[in-house]
Image: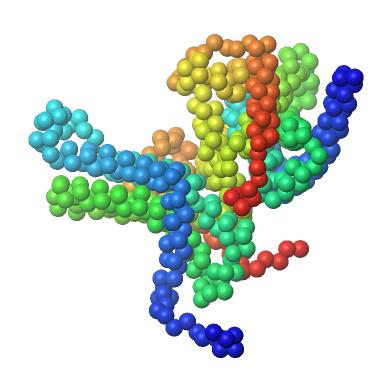
């Protein structure tokens, strides 16, 4: 075809609906995430605990299986708030390790290779970019935390009957909300570190250090200064305190009473942290950067 | 003739190490990446300063006979196992990985310089930065901790109660920690494209050291550093009891271990090829 016959023609194919454009990013991100055998293997490993808990729930309601295994129902762990709380905490820990593996390269690759203009020159806003990158983690972490948690809850409800469901419906909300808080905090932290530390290994390390050093330091501050406010720098305790409130289990970490952080302080600190992460992300996620 | 050539080689290598040192020290102390190390090193000093300024804890330190044990516990948990560990991870992994991220390692590789000399120069530069910052952090922590006891008490204790020896021991342990962890993290930074997993494994191994059987305990850096502590720190009820390694074995063992790791790093770097795109 002669060159003069080339002229501008707008794209006439089907367009992705505006509300779903951010989902294009996770679609491509999952390809690179699961290319890594380590990430794939670890993701599969995250289903071991739900599987064991599923078997435990099944055994509770299957008298013949219990008789065959020579178990007494009383010997099995009770299926109550503690059971689901353990599940949320354990899966949350695995989710943290998974985020350390998967989260840091999400934004850093685009920034290190100056790829952001390629995203943002399309009908795609900065907010959609952040939401899209965040949804990579949101979806994967949901798949190993509250979704299997709700499935376990549903199985228990179906086996135990309507009475149990109506009495424990609040547990379903507690599972979703406490997992959700952890997921949002982790995702925002991972994206912020990924955007500000362009070296993905350093970003993974920083995410790990953000949870470990403040944990020890917060405990030391509390112990030495006889205060509870050292927990404010301790992300793990903040998330657990919020979960305590949702699961109606005050002080599940068995701190002395003077060391228990008020629930409002945990919510407020996590809220401020998320807002700070969003502010840092909005400063870094730009199509161009002026370097002086 | 051969002796003369060997001595000229050594003098050349030493000059080259000096040149690398001059470049790297600027990066290690004044580069953007150094900011994190300053922050890390400042954490224990700020903590002990707050302890000295907080009237209640200062009174506890003045009054208490167990202040040495308090310091020993905080030193080991905060400074040695967290700050020195992560600080060394950052400084020493950055020596080569940082150059790869900045796409500048080929400048060193193109220079007429033996790669083993590059490893030695980089290691010494990291060591200077880590030892200076974390050594000062340990001494600053001691200064603020004992400042709460008052000048006269301190002067008396330093001269008569052997606290000067304690202070030197803590400084020595910190420096030995920098030697050992530095070599390990430089090795990891050279061998692994993604050093986070081996780094986490080393962290887990060092933290769970107290649970390990006595033989395995000895395959760790923290075991030797722990046995060198001037005030013994209890490891908790779950700890397995292992025979204390005397200082005359601990110190040479750590130095020997560092040398072996550096030799392995030198062997590795001889065959190293740079692929910036893969990073």
Q: Residue at x 47, y 82 (%)?
A: A11
- Relative to A156, A137 lies left or right: right
Q: How many marks?
A: 0
**Horizontal and vertical percent position of residue B145:** 69, 29
Query: Along the horizontal axis of the image, is B16 left or right of B109?
Result: right
Among the 4 quarters of the image, the one containing residue A292? bottom right
Q: Is residue A120 visible?
A: yes
| In the rendered image, the vertical position of residue A166 relative to residue B147, given as above or below | below
Point 55% across, 31% down: residue: B202
In the rendering, at what x and y percent does residue A57 appear?
A: 21, 41
Q: Is residue B76 above or below residue A168?
A: above
Colour basis? rainbow
Residue appearing at x 62%, y 30% in the figure: B184
Residue A89 visible in the displayed image: no
Q: Nearer the viewer, residue A29 or B249?
A: A29
Q: Position of residue B21 (x, y in %)?
A: 81, 37
Tell me if residue A17 comes above or below residue A254 in the rendering.
below
Q: Is residue B215 above or below residue A128?
A: above
- Quadrant the N terminus of chain B occupies: top right
Left or right, B229 with respect to B13, comes to left
In the foreground, B165 or A38: A38
Which residue is drawn at the image coordinates 52% and 56% (left, top)? A106
């Amino acid at each position: 075809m002669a060159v003069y016959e080339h002229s501008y023609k707008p794209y006439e194919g089907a367009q992705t609906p505006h509300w779903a454009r951010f989902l294009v990013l996770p679609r491509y991100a999952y390809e690179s995430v699961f290319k890594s055998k380590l990430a794939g293997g670890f993701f599969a490993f995250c289903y071991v605990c739900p599987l064991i808990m599923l078997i435990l729930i099944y055994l509770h309601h299957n008298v013949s299986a219990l008789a065959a295994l020579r178990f007494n129902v009383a010997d099995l762990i009770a299926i109550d708030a503690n059971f689901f709380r353990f599940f949320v905490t354990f899966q949350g820990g695995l989710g943290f390790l998974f985020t350390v593996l998967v989260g840091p390269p999400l934004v850093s690759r685009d920034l290190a290779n100056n790829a952001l203009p390629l995203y943002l020159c399309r009908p795609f806003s900065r907010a959609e970019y952040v939401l899209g990158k965040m949804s990579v983690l949101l979806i994967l972490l949901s798949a190993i935390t509250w979704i299997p948690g709700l499935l376990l809850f549903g199985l228990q409800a179906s086996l135990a009957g309507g009475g149990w469901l109506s009495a424990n419906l609040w547990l379903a909300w507690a599972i979703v909300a406490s997992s959700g808080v952890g997921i949002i905090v982790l995702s925002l932290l991972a994206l912020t570190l990924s955007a500000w530390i362009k070296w993905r290994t350093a970003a993974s390390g920083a995410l790990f250090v953000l949870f470990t050093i403040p944990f020890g330091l917060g405990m030391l501050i509390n112990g030495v200064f006889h205060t509870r406010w050292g927990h404010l720098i301790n992300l793990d305790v903040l998330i657990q305190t919020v979960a305590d409130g949702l699961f109606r289990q005050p002080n599940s970490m068995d701190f002395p009473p003077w060391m228990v952080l008020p629930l409002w302080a945990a919510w407020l600190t996590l809220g401020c942290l998320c807002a700070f992460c969003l502010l840092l992300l909005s400063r870094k996620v730009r199509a161009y950067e002026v370097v002086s | 003739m051969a002796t003369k050539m060997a001595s000229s080689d050594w003098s050349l290598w030493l000059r080259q190490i000096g040149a690398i040192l001059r470049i790297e020290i600027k990066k290690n102390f004044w580069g953007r990446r150094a900011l994190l190390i300053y922050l890390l090193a400042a954490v224990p000093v700020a903590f002990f300063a707050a302890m000295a300024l907080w009237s209640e804890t200062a009174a506890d330190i003045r009054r208490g006979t167990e202040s040495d044990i308090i310091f020993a516990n905080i030193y080991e948990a905060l400074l040695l196992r967290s700050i020195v560990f992560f600080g060394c991870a950052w400084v020493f992994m950055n020596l080569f990985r940082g150059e790869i991220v900045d796409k500048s390692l080929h400048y060193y590789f193109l220079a007429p310089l033996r790669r083993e000399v590059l490893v030695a120069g980089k290691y010494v530069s990291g060591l200077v930065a880590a030892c200076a910052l974390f050594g000062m952090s340990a001494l600053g922590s001691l200064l603020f901790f004992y400042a709460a006891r008052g000048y006269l008490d301190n002067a008396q204790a330093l001269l008569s109660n052997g606290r000067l020896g304690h202070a030197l021991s803590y400084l020595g342990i910190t420096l030995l920690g920098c030697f050992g962890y530095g070599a390990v993290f430089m090795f990891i930074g050279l061998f692994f494209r993604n050093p986070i997993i081996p780094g986490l494994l080393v962290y887990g191994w060092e933290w769970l050291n107290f649970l390990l059987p006595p033989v395995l305990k000895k395959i760790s850096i923290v075991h030797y550093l722990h046995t060198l502590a001037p005030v013994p720190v209890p490891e908790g009820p779950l700890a397995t009891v292992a025979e204390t390694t005397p200082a005359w074995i601990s110190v040479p063992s750590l130095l020997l271990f560092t040398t072996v790791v550096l030799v392995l790093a030198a062997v590795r770097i001889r065959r190293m090829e740079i692929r910036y795109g893969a990073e």
